[in-house]
Image (tube, rainbow, N blue to C red):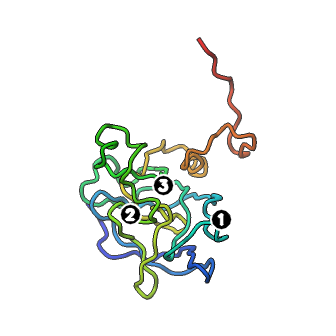
Amino acid sequence: MSIQSAPRPSTAVTFRGGAGLGVEPIHVAPPGRGQVRVDIRATGVCHSDLHIVNGDWPADKPLVLGHEAAGVVTDTGPEVDGLAVGDHVVLSWFAPCGRCLNCAAGRAWLCTGTKALENTLPDGSTAYTDAEGHGLWPYLGLGTFTKSVIVPETAAIAIPQDLPFEVGALPSTSRPISSPRRPASVPPPRSAPTRS
């Protein structure tokens, strides 16, 4: 159950269309039903963030950018049973709805009810407001360019406590670890898989 009932102040990198990028104070609502608050410890810039900033992809509402991140669960809403305060997590921008035919059949990766592409939480809302109380929308349902995010429990995947956050954030959009330009902090594999 939520340990904080008032919105929490934070700072975020926002995109407001023609006004471009900005850094501004925001408020982050407490987690609702099935949601968790995650304090971001590592986040990355993906080319899809740049597509928004460069105008390649439309942004019809003000956004908190970012969708690749890892952090620590610091609060949980009602009906959260798979995560607890203190859990280390990586965030997935594709939060399955849990209600469509594919989710019901155990194929959440084929979910047709996700709201991520609408830049909202699964219920169509946002947890972010600006200093004037106007909504700021979480890019791809996350909006990780801030200190604290509210996400559905289904978008927060537990990782080992000893895994560095910057490593945990790498695969958050299923980025292949075996890319030719391996980050320096990720060692090469010790052996190649073999066929039996």
Q: Rounded to the nearest whole Å, what is the CA distance between mark 1 and mark 2?
A: 21 Å
Kind of residue at disc 1:
Leu
**Chain-order first, disc 3 or disc 1:** 1
Name the residue carrying label 1.
50
Q: Is residue 39 above or below residue 97?
A: below
Kind of residue at disc 3:
Trp
Q: How far across and how far down the image is residue 125, in percent?
A: 35, 69
Q: Is residue 130 above or below residue 80?
A: below
Q: Is residue 111 above or below residue 134?
A: above
Q: Look at 70% across and 37% down and name the residue there.
A: 187
Q: Which of these two is toward me, 47 or 147?
A: 47
User: Are the residues flagged by discs 1 and 2 in contact, CB closer than 8 Å?
Assistant: no
Crowding at dot 3, Cα within 10 Å, few <14 / some 14-19 / many 20+, comes out as many
Q: Which mark is residue 93?
A: 3
Q: Which of these two is toward me, 123 or 14?
A: 123
Question: For numbered disc 1, what is the local secondary structure?
Answer: helix
Q: Which of these two is toward me, 169 or 126?
A: 126
Q: If the image is split into quadrants, where does the N terminus sit?
A: bottom left
Q: Which mark is residue 187?
A: none
Crowding at dot 2, Cα within 10 Å, few <14 / some 14-19 / many 20+, comes out as many
Kind of residue at disc 2:
Leu
Q: Look at 43% across and 47% down and name the residue there.
A: 157
Q: Residue furthest bottom?
A: 132
Q: How far across and how far down the image is residue 134, in percent?
A: 42, 83
Rendered image quadrant of residue 103: top left
**Chain-order first, disc 1 or disc 2:** 1
Question: For numbered disc 3, what is the local secondary structure?
Answer: loop
Name the residue carrying label 2.
121
Q: How far across and how far down the image is residue 142, in percent?
A: 47, 62
Q: Rounded to the nearest whole Å, what is the CA distance between mark 3 and mark 1?
A: 16 Å
Q: How far across and how far down the image is residue 20, in percent?
A: 63, 79
